Image: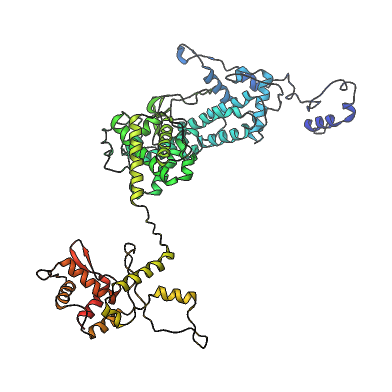
């Protein structure tokens, strides 16, 4: 083959594809995997490139210059130095065995495993993430955490996130460690906090902040807890208004919220939107969920208002009688503790981290001083609050009893002070509801005709003989309507007999408050007829009613009773108006406003 350029890889491919070689006796007695029959020297399992030998030559014992005493490298530092040396290396010798190590590094691998790892890593960097030994995956994660194979911190975050998203399908157990390392990577390198939008720790922080903001109008001391009363943060990763330091000066104890029984916990009429926000916070974070209660489905307004009001009262109670408020005590205690970056990982800092302050959110901050990190946050705030659940359940139980709602809950353990607060809010709410309940007016129209018929008979019985001689009493409109409805008498021609009639005014008694009386038809004409004959009132009665029109009532004549005079005037005017003209109010006798014009026409024709 002299004089010709030979591609060794092409030659091997041809040999591997040759069926004659495959069926040879040398290869017919065995079980084979998907591996090449002929390999290059680099692909031979027994072959070890010089790069690996030089990497292993990096000794853990490091001599110091100038004759100073040497030192042993830590496992993390040795791994970092070896990873830097092998940062751009790639191999082509797959490993199909298994590699297991608790803190895996290159030193824990055999030569064959080393070659298999760097072959697998080369494929990962090309975007081909294949399942392998989980320890290999952790070694690659350690490399990224230490900045091996990344251009900058943001590139490192993206590669960490991409590998985690791909490999968790093969090994979901890596979630527990990788979530923490991603969190630490953002803090350590001062990246944007929004990169941790789905971080469980930050999600919990934001939920606690939302609770505090919901209750802040009723418990102003929560503003100090959130750090809203301090200066702005110096780091761009921190939230606006959050101080960079990890400590806060103790705030003066605020005055407790109003707890007097004469003051309402929440305004009435209720602010439904505001109460819904409070109930939302309770629903998300209490161990007892009010909206799942049968009482809520039957009486949502009752349970919503009373539960929200009880929690507002409890905010004041805790602030007055406890060392910490209801929100702070229910979701853990704020404290500053030492923090280890990238715990459970093989991580080495070539240079100590510069002093830094990072505010992940208003209640979660980190501080680095001389390479040592501390974290100030709410510890113990995981899960739903048992204390909140007990308050919500006790409220549900006692409100059911007050409303006689079935089924009743099993009586929960409830401190006396809590029972007193709940009962007071229930009583206040139910009293307000009764006082502002809409009035229901039920008018039985079937009885109106009977009332009017009885009124006509009574009127006929009260007439004197002279009044009877003047003419027959006109039938009431209802009576005429009934007669017409029942079938009016027919004329000889078969038509309905027609009579000239005047409608009779309705009775004023029995009208609802604020309802205007129905005025009699044509009262002015009836008054004119009476005036033409001299008028029904005497001179004294005319003077008395004229004074009422002017708003300057006169006393009754000497020897006469004012009550009797008013009754007499009302009787005389009843035929004209069909109703009482004068009534007694708080200031004495007064004219009914609807008939003032008719009476003025009567006495001043």
Position of 90 compared to 311: left or right?
right
Quadrant occupied by the C terminus: bottom left
The image position of residue 156, as x and y in percent, is 54, 34
Determine which quarter of the picture holds residue 517. Answer: bottom left
**Residue 364 picture location, percent across and down:** 41, 33
Q: Residue furthest bottom?
A: 493
Left or right, 161 with respect to 67, comes to: right
Question: Does residue 149 appear in this view?
Answer: yes
Q: Is residue 94 above or below residue 231?
A: above
Quadrant in which the N terminus is drawn: top right
Residue at the front extreme, as displayed: 465
Residue 187 location (% of width, % of height)? 45, 32
Viewer-side residue, 452 vs 441: 452
Q: Nearer the viewer, residue 514 or 576?
A: 576
Foreground residue among 154 and 592: 592
Q: Residue at x 67, y 31 (%)?
A: 130
Point out residue 173 in the picture as x, y percentages from the top left corner.
Answer: 59, 27
116 lies above or below 484: above
Q: How is the image coloured?
A: rainbow
The part of the image, by quadrant, that contains residue 550 is bottom left
| Residue drawn at point x = 38 percent, y = 38 percent | 212
Residue that extends furthest to the left in the rendered view of this protein: 558
Q: What is the count of numbered marks?
A: 0
- Residue 90 is at least partly visible in this image: no
Up/down of 502 relative to 398, above or below: below
Q: Give 500 or 180, whichever is nearer the viewer.
A: 500
With respect to residue 81, does 544 lie above or below? below
């Amino acid at each position: 083959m002299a004089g010709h350029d030979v591609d060794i890889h092409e030659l091997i491919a041809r040999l591997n594809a040759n069926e004659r070689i495959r069926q040879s006796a040398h290869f017919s007695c065995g079980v084979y995997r998907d591996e090449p029959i002929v390999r290059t020297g680099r692909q031979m399992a027994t072959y070890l490139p010089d790069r690996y030998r030089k990497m292993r030559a990096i000794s853990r014992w490091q001599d110091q210059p100038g004759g100073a005493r040497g030192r042993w490298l830590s496992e993390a530092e040795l791994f970092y130095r070896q990873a830097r040396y092998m940062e751009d290396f790639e191999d082509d010798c797959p490993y199909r065995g298994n590699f297991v190590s608790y803190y895996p590094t290159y030193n824990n691998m055999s030569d064959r495993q080393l070659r298999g790892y760097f072959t697998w890593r080369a494929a990962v960097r090309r975007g081909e993430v294949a399942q392998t030994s989980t320890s290999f995956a952790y070694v690659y994660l350690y490399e990224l955490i230490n900045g091996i194979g990344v251009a900058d911190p943001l590139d490192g975050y993206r590669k960490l996130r991409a590998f985690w998203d791909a490999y968790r399908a093969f090994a979901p157990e890596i979630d527990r460690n990788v979530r923490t390392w991603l969190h630490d990577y953002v803090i350590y390198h001062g990246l944007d906090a929004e990169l941790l939008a789905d971080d469980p720790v930050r999600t919990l922080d934001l939920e606690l902040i939302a609770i505090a903001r919901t209750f802040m109008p009723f418990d102003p001391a929560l503003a100090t807890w959130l750090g809203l009363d301090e200066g702005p943060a110096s780091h761009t990763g921190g939230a606006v208004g959050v101080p960079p330091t990890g400590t806060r000066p103790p705030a003066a104890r605020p005055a407790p919220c109003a707890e007097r029984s004469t003051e309402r916990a929440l305004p009435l009429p209720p602010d439904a939107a505001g109460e819904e926000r409070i109930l939302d916070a309770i629903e998300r974070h209490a161990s007892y969920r009010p909206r799942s209660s049968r009482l809520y489905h039957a009486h949502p307004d009752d349970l919503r208002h009373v539960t929200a009001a009880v929690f507002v009262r409890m905010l004041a109670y805790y602030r007055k009688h406890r060392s910490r408020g209801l929100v702070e005590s229910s979701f853990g205690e704020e404290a500053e503790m030492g923090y280890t970056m990238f715990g459970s990982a093989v991580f080495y800092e070539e240079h100590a981290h510069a002093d830094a302050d990072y505010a992940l959110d208003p209640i979660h901050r980190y501080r680095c001083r001389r390479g040592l990190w501390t974290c100030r946050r709410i510890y113990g705030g995981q899960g739903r609050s048992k204390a909140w659940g007990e308050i919500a359940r006790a409220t549900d139980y006692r409100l059911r009893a007050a409303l006689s709602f079935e089924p009743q809950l099993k009586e929960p353990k409830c401190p006396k002070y809590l029972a007193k607060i709940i009962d007071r809010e229930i009583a206040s709410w139910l009293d307000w509801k009764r006082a502002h309940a809409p009035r229901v007016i039920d008018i039985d129209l079937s009885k109106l005709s009977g009332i009017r018929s009885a009124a006509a008979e009574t009127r006929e019985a009260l007439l004197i003989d002279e009044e009877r001689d003047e003419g027959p009493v006109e039938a009431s409109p209802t009576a005429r309507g009934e007669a017409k409805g029942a079938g009016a008498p027919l004329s000889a021609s078969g038509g309905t007999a027609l009579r000239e009639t005047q409608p009779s005014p309705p009775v004023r008694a029995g009208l609802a408050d604020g309802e205007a009386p129905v005025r009699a038809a044509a009262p002015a004409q009836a008054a004119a007829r009476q005036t033409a004959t001299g008028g029904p009132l005497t001179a004294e009665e005319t003077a008395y009613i004229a004074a009422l029109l002017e708003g300057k009532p006169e006393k009754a004549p000497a020897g006469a009773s004012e009550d009797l005079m008013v009754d007499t005037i009302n009787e005389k005017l009843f035929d004209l108006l069909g109703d009482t003209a004068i009534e007694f109010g708080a200031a004495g006798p007064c004219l009914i406003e609807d008939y003032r014009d008719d009476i003025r026409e009567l006495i001043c024709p």
